[in-house]
Image (spheres, grey):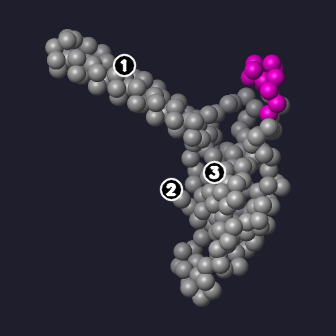
Amino acid sequence: MTTNYVTGLSLDECAKRIRARTYGLTGMVKPSWYSLLGRSERPGEGTVVAELKNDRFRLYAFGPRWLRNSFAPHLYGTIASVVERTRISCRFQMHGAARAFLIVWFGVLAIAVTLVLLAVISSLAPRSVLWEALLGAGGMAAFCLALVGASRYAAHGQRIRLERFLREDLEAVPDNPALSAQAEHLGGSGASKPQL
């Protein structure tokens, strides 16, 4: 679900603060044998890192050093100039690689159950195989859902930190659609891209 925020900062100032007050996502963690063992020189808990391309951004807040959470939320969004202020439209979601993993996981389960079902229907396998397949697939699906749920619970602080970044660093507040429509009607859209 997309949430809109507004800030009195200019579009260029928002882009500047996203770049200046965060670390870059690329080249941040140096690869070494030490990091292959699960330890790395990564920023501390609560550190926000960003990737900014034109008017699009992605923010991520690091969690505890002892936890590598692949299902932690990232904040994806856009910034646009609207009548002497900036609108920030954003949404929380998992990284694309984590979403792809879940699609593959559940896709393989669905294909396996479908193949077993077809084998039972065509009398190539006994009916008991179907129940075993359904039980196994159900258990694997439940395990995956529990893992994602536990990961989201563990990442609660990271989500709060990203919301705090919006409020404090970008001075953004939730948008009031009625006031925004009235301001756009009176002053025009004035939309532009940040100068990067």
Q: Secondary structure at mark 3?
A: strand
Q: Name the residue that disc number 1 marks.
A: 136
Sequence order check, earlier mark of 2 and 3: 2
Can residue 69 be seen in the rendering of this structure? yes
Q: Name the residue that disc number 2 marks.
A: 1
Q: How many marks?
A: 3
The residue sitting at 71% across, 79% down in the picture is 84
Q: Is 31 contained in the magenta span?
A: yes
Q: Name the residue that disc number 3 marks.
A: 75
Q: CA distance from mark 2 to mark 3?
A: 11 Å
Can residue 146 be seen in the rendering of this structure? no
Q: Outermost residue toward the bottom?
A: 186
Sequence order check, earlier mark of 2 and 1: 2
Q: Quadrant of residue 135?
A: top left
Q: Residues within 10 Å of mark 1 (few under 14, many from 20)?
A: some
Could you tell me residue 57's position as x and y percent? Answer: 67, 54
Q: Amino acid at mark 3?
A: Leu
Sequence order check, earlier mark of 1 and 3: 3
Q: Secondary structure at mark 1?
A: helix
Q: Quadrant of residue 152?
A: top right
Q: Amino acid at mark 2?
A: Met
